[in-house]
Image: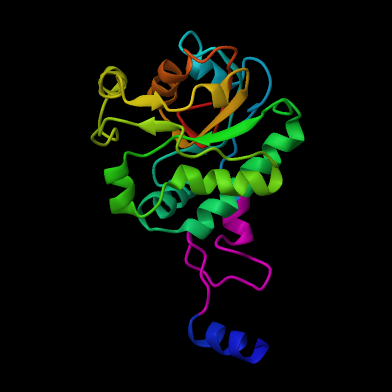
Amino acid sequence: MKFLSDFIRLFFPRACCICGMPLVESEHQICSACLLDLPEVPSSLGEDNFVERRLRGRIPVQNATALYVFRQQSGTQQVLHQIKYQGNEELAVMMGESLGLHLAASHLFDTVDVIIPVPLHRRKQRRRGYNQSQMLCDGIAYTFPRPVMVGNLVRIRYTETQTLKNRQQRLDNMKDVFAVGDVEALRGKHVLLVDDVITTGATFEACWMALKHVEGITISVAALAVTGDT
């Protein structure tokens, strides 16, 4: 089997999804240099961190965090593009594992009961083949062991892409998008909502509008990346 693996690597070398350079044996998806070069969010944990400020006054989050800063033409942008549009599920799970380690190390998220990925509309998920946020959650659960709940928070209205919309347009676009199926399953729970990237926070806000009617629910949020200057 090792001979076969060596043969495959010889003619089909694994390459870094950011810079395209060949990966060494111990590297997966991203080379060590590019991984170290990904811009981390400074002071991304604790009270008054950058992500919490982004959501302040809109969502009563217990804790909020993101791992990397999203900038145009950055490694973070390439990672998100691979996860979202290139079908790289393995990369999504791997990055989720990193996010899970980040959550576990902080201890601020220790009381989380369940992880919920921001859902895609079934039409968009059918076209894409998977929900990238769910893949992130699967990775998170490896290193931050919590059950991942899929199918209870659902997207009931199809929305066009948010990419070119301003903050108000994003908020308008996300009105009445989500609904909760089994309210009892979330009663009194501390829920960690997970998405790939936070831009204006409109998506998390729309999730909260559906979840806020659940008695005793507590919300925390986490994302792989957040846009803007930190």
Q: Is residue 18 magenta?
A: yes
Compared across the picture, whether 46 is left or right of 169 comes to: right
The residue that appears at 41% across and 37% down in the rendered structure is 119
Compared across the picture, whether 214 is left or right of 129 comes to: right
Q: Is residue 200 something one can see in this rendering?
A: no
Magenta segment: 13-36
Q: Horizontal and vertical percent for residue 69?
A: 51, 36
Q: How is the image coloured?
A: rainbow
Which residue extends farthest top?
57
Observer-nearest residue: 184 or 44? 184
Task: Considering the whole magenta stretch, tell me its main secondary structure.
Answer: loop
Q: Horizontal and vertical percent for residue 135?
A: 51, 49
The residue that appears at 47% across and 12% down in the rendered structure is 213
As displayed, is residue 125 above or below residue 221?
A: below
Quarter residue 43 falls in: top right
Q: Is residue 198 magenta?
A: no
